[in-house]
Amino acid sequence: MTPLLDLQGVSKSFPVRKTGLFGRHRNEVKALVQITLDVYKGETVSIVGESGCGKSTLARTAGMLLAPDSGTVKLNGRNVYGLRAREKLALRRQMHLVFQDPYSSLNPRLSVGEIVGEPLIIHKVGDARSRIEKVKKVLAEVGLQPHHLNKYPHQFSGGQRQRIALARALILRPDLIIADEPLSALDVSVQGQIINLLADLKKAHHLTYIIISHDLSVVSHVSDRVIVMYQGRIVESATAESLFQNPCHPYTQLLLAAAPRLREAPRRRVRDHAYETAGIVPDQTGCQFAPRCQKTQEICGLAPPRLESAPNASEDHQVACHFPEVI
């Protein structure tokens, strides 16, 4: 099968001003390092990792908001950063992002009808009457009523605002939705409603999801495949079942150990090592996780591990570790 979204060797760095005379000396933070990722139609791929690991940068790069320094991003076989502005605009109809904070991502000066219908205007879809009908239809799909059309974002709860953001994402019937922490700003009870809504929408419209999340219990519930990132690199990739049952990378084991509900689950118990979890280690030649790992050996500081098939795990379970461990 041809992947819906194909990232090959994607890297992205950001300059950081160093403390010094007149601030002339500069350094850079490597947000993404040689990321290769395929997402196939109908999949739900979740990306997890601690804050600062590059999850959101990856989402914005894949979502055509942030051009990579190197590598290619292809959507339906087309290199999105090699297109002209008009071609890129047409391709944007096939992909939409849903952001973490539904309030800050919605224009407070526009009504719900204007917010949800704006993509139709940008892409010149239909006339004014047909646009209103499309907006009403998509609002009904996310659980909102026609009388909400003339209200403004501040008049809604957090869960309702996220539904508005989802309606805007769906209005052009995209193939791919990238959701960056779509549940973190919501109450637990509302999170369950949004999870069920995402599942219903996926089934109804044959959607493909990329979900960025810190909540491993949600990830285990909704994902077909899970990508674990650490300091801009993919360190483990597997089906949700394989990853949660047999985490092979020490960092993945650390993440699971930090999640109480997963820690006590049968067949998901991980070894409770005394990992050093504070701070960010500087960029180095070998494995980035080596300074925090209890299994570090000489080779770990010399050569970065490649993402390869994990021993004694499922065929599509890959891990970037010199000494992977199957629990």
Image (tube, rainbow, N blue to C red):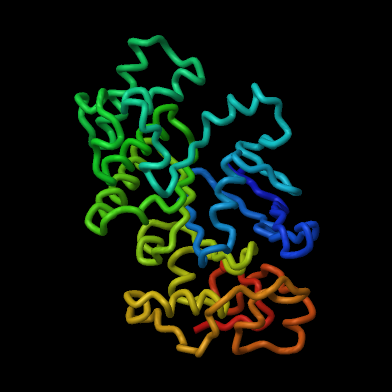
Residue found 59% across the figure and 29% down from its top: 91
Compared to residue 133, the image places residue 223 above or below, namely: below
- The foreground one among 185 and 11 is 185
Residue found 60% across the figure and 82% down from its top: 292
How far across and how far down the image is residue 151, in percent? 25, 28
- The foreground one among 177 and 19 is 19
How far across and how far down the image is residue 20, in percent? 76, 64
* Residue 316 appears in the figure: no
Residue found 78% across the figure and 74% down from its top: 285
- The foreground one among 104 and 234 is 104
How far across and how far down the image is residue 197, in percent? 29, 45
- Horizontal placement of 27 versus 108: left or right? right
Compared to residue 227, the image places residue 110 above or below, namely: above
How far across and how far down the image is residue 74, in percent? 65, 40
- Horizontal placement of 326 versus 202: left or right? right
- Specify the quadrant that holds the N terminus: top right
